[in-house]
Image (spheres, helix red, strand yellow):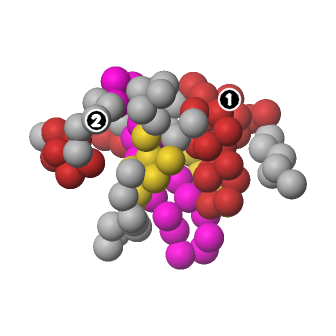
Amino acid sequence: MKPVISTLSLAAVLGLSATLANAQDDGTQDVCMPAAEMKASLVDWYGETPVSEPSAKGEQMWASDRSGTWTMVKLLADGSACVIAQGENWMAGAESPKQLAMLNR
């Protein structure tokens, strides 16, 4: 059974284009939802899969070689997940640690 996502959440996820730094500067909030819904959204809408296991901070990178999109998700202790950054031009074929290092510059 596919989770139902509200229209507002869908619009927010699809329209989110700022990084976490930009989101904090302009007063907007991260897009958050139950982790199972976040996973279904990333898989179904973008064809993204996890690139790595969650870090010690609960951050996990998802990406799609097919669409070139990527999403950084923060997993929270309450079972929800928040998009903290996303973008395009994921470098298909490059090793995950190399890509993560380039994004953290």
Query: Mark number for residue 11?
Result: 1
Q: Is residue 60 visible?
A: yes
Q: Which residues are magenta?
A: 70-90
Name the residue located 65 percent from the left edge and 33 percent from the top edge: 45
**Residue 82 position in % (x across, y down):** 52, 53
Quick check: 22 above or below 29? above
Q: Amino acid at mark 1?
A: Ala
For label 2, the residue is: 93
Name the residue located 82 percent from the left edge and 50 percent from the top edge: 2
Q: Nearer the viewer, residue 83 or 25?
A: 83
Name the residue located 49 percent from the left edge and 64 percent from the top edge: 75
**Magenta span contains residue 98:** no
Sequence-wise first label, 1 or 2: 1
Cβ–Cβ under 8 Å for marks 1 and 2: no
Q: Amino acid at mark 2?
A: Gly
**Residue 19 position in % (x across, y down):** 36, 36
| Main secondary-structure element of the magenta-colored stretch | strand
Whether residue 93 sits left or right of residue 48 in the image: it is: left
The C terminus sits in image quarter: top left
Secondary structure at numbered mark 2:
loop
Whether residue 100 sits left or right of residue 26 in the image: it is: left
